[in-house]
Image (cartoon, rainbow, N blue to C red):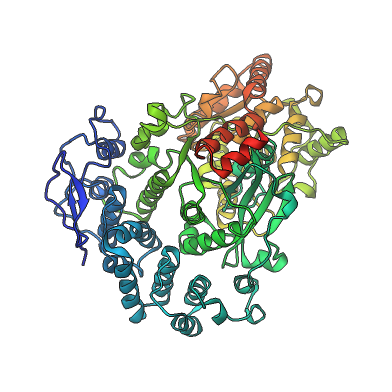
Amino acid sequence: MEDIALPTAPAAGSATGAAGDGTVTGNVFAGPGARTGPAPDDDVFVDLRSTFWTGRIRPAAAGAGAGALLNLTQAEYGWPFPEGIAWEAEDLSLARLRRACRMGLAHSPETLTGHAGGSDRLRAAAAEAWPDALRVHGADSARDALREALRHRPAGAATAALLDVATARGLRPLEPEEAAELAAAGDRATRHAAWRYLAGVPGGASLLPVSAEAEDPYERLMLLPGQDPLLPAAARRPGLLVAQPMLLGGLDTPGEGLSGGLSVLLSGLGDALADTGAVAAVVTVVTASRSELARDDSLLHARGPGHWVLRLPVDAEHPLGQHEMGAHREALAWWAVRLLGGLGARLDVLHARYADDGSLAMAQAAERLGARLVFTATPDPHRQMTARHGRAPAASDDLRDDLHRVFVADRLVERAARVVAIPGQQGDASELVRHFPQLAAARDGAGPAAPPEGIQPYVPAASEASDRADLLGMVLGGGGSGGARRAPLGPDALREPLLLCVGRLHPVKQQDMLVRAWLERGLYRRSSLVLIGGASDRPSAAETAMRARIGRLLARHPGAAHRLVLLTALSNTRVRRLERALADPASGARAWYVCPSAKEEFGIAVLEAMDAGLPTAAPERGGVRHYLRDGDNGVLLDTSSAPALGLGLERMLDMPPSAARALAARGRATVTSGYTLTSTAAALVEEYLATTPPGTPADARAATRG
């Protein structure tokens, strides 16, 4: 039974608060700092969020027949719950929890413990509601509620969730001996949660098993006693200590699985930040599954001068996917606190990207460590909510997942000492503020800073000429090193335009739509297509599915098969070398770089292709258009459908070679004039220092290197 009372109509301008019994009272539609806002937006999801954050009154339009998006959104943002709806219990609970979190209102501890057996989404929302429950009801009430819930011994996942709440909030509902009994009798999830609990209570560590008794590398690492500081003393220079999580994909395998442009960005950015003079060290935080730990159980690796890679163990046999993060949220937070807190120097700033449960875990860790959170926010999935879900009569898991990501993003914004935008279509944060109206007042009304991202300078190899020849031979003459799946193009392919597309094989990257457009427009008769991406060893389900779709498309056009090559992912250095080989006039190639993604928030791969000197085409949706100007230094593509994309491809192929070369030259000049990692690092350091109050030790350390 929920314990919040819901008014039947919004009370404009009424006070917000929480009654002593945990009942939500007051204005349930106007968010914190309500004020008169702009005119209604033409996007219903944007409009409802703006209504909440600005306090503008608008008539309710939800109800039976209104659609799942409108009904769930109005319920979540504080309008009266639409009548005549067959609500699922969890949807109702989620709406109430999220509304209370956004407004700083409290549920009772008993209500929150009742959600421990729910989905990952429900547990995440309940975890976010605990601070307000503690503020209103006190630690004693929370501890008693947890103890009562644990006494009834719910299912394993619920018991683990309750123990993790106690660990995260510093509560002690169980005596150490009781927790040890749970660990001994429970399943794996309960055992690990009990160990996390015991590690944080007086006398608990003595009841943990010895590391030698562990079943696998993950448990062995959990049970290791306290160690010397992970970061060598020689590495602890004056300046800020910065952590930058990248929990999805591998840092050194862009184009494989979930590894993409972020791995390329953070690899170079860590080095650039450490070289600014204000940063003592950068720790790039990644994950390591049980199978990866079995091969190498070391947790800290030196990456470069002042740049380190820290591996958070994950209790899974394979690298995590984004939808799996929720089940590991509290464990990730615990490991981050343990390992980042054990570096031997206090963490100053944690810079999170992505609105997912992994980032929420890192934000929780930053709070426990006393570090400031910086969050790069993007309007994703916000900008597509109405288009994707506006006509759906019933709630789907996709809609629920997107609403969860929006909620997580709001919580990260709320927790952040500084929010940073990726430049939108106008080159600033205006698009972000449209979707996050609570950010309109940031920086005295200027909105969040939007420093452009950049790329590392390309460094030719000593064997550059022969390496380029080998890469061209791989495309034109085949070869196992690139993992060619289809017959090579042959040297005659350079006499006609060649389209190059590099990226991880994933639905949002739309390589299948590119192939469909190229085939259905008949462009295979006058050009060739080279796709690079995907793992060669143990491909993911998404990669396998994408390759299968491309195969089915080619099967319907047998005359096109010899004009397409699909290679597995190459290292970033080899991709950039191949792009330069194709752009070199001496090769005789007439190559274009094509990015067919549904949207790109920034487009590191696009910048790298422009820097190589290739004429480049990229999606008009997202942030690419703030640096790529259609017909001037590149081509903007409508990637919303195969026919629209086909028209864009045809427009490219019809461009005279001289015009394509001029376009490419202007594209290269754009990148070299302002999109370097040095400038990105300098801008981010300003944001990091802005979170540090003058006179604090971190500020003083940074000043000594400035």
Q: Nearer the viewer, residue 105 or 434?
A: 105
Q: Say which quadrant the N terminus sits in.
A: bottom left
Q: Residue at x 22, y 47 (%)?
A: 78
Q: Is residue 429 left or right of residue 679?
A: left
Q: Is residue 337 above or below residue 178?
A: above
Q: Residue 205: x percent and y percent?
A: 55, 76
Q: Nearer the viewer, residue 453 or 666?
A: 453
Report which quarter residue 558 is drawn in. top right
Q: Nearer the viewer, residue 400 or 649?
A: 400
Q: Residue 298: x percent and y percent?
A: 70, 63
Outermost residue to the left: 8
Report which quarter residue 443 is drawn in. top left
Report which quarter residue 57 is drawn in. top left
Taking the image as drawn, is residue 45 in sight? yes
Q: Residue at x 64, y 82 (%)?
A: 213
Q: Residue 30: x percent and y percent?
A: 22, 41
Outermost residue to the front: 695
Taking the image as drawn, is residue 504 in sight? no
Q: Residue at x 78, y 22 (%)?
A: 585
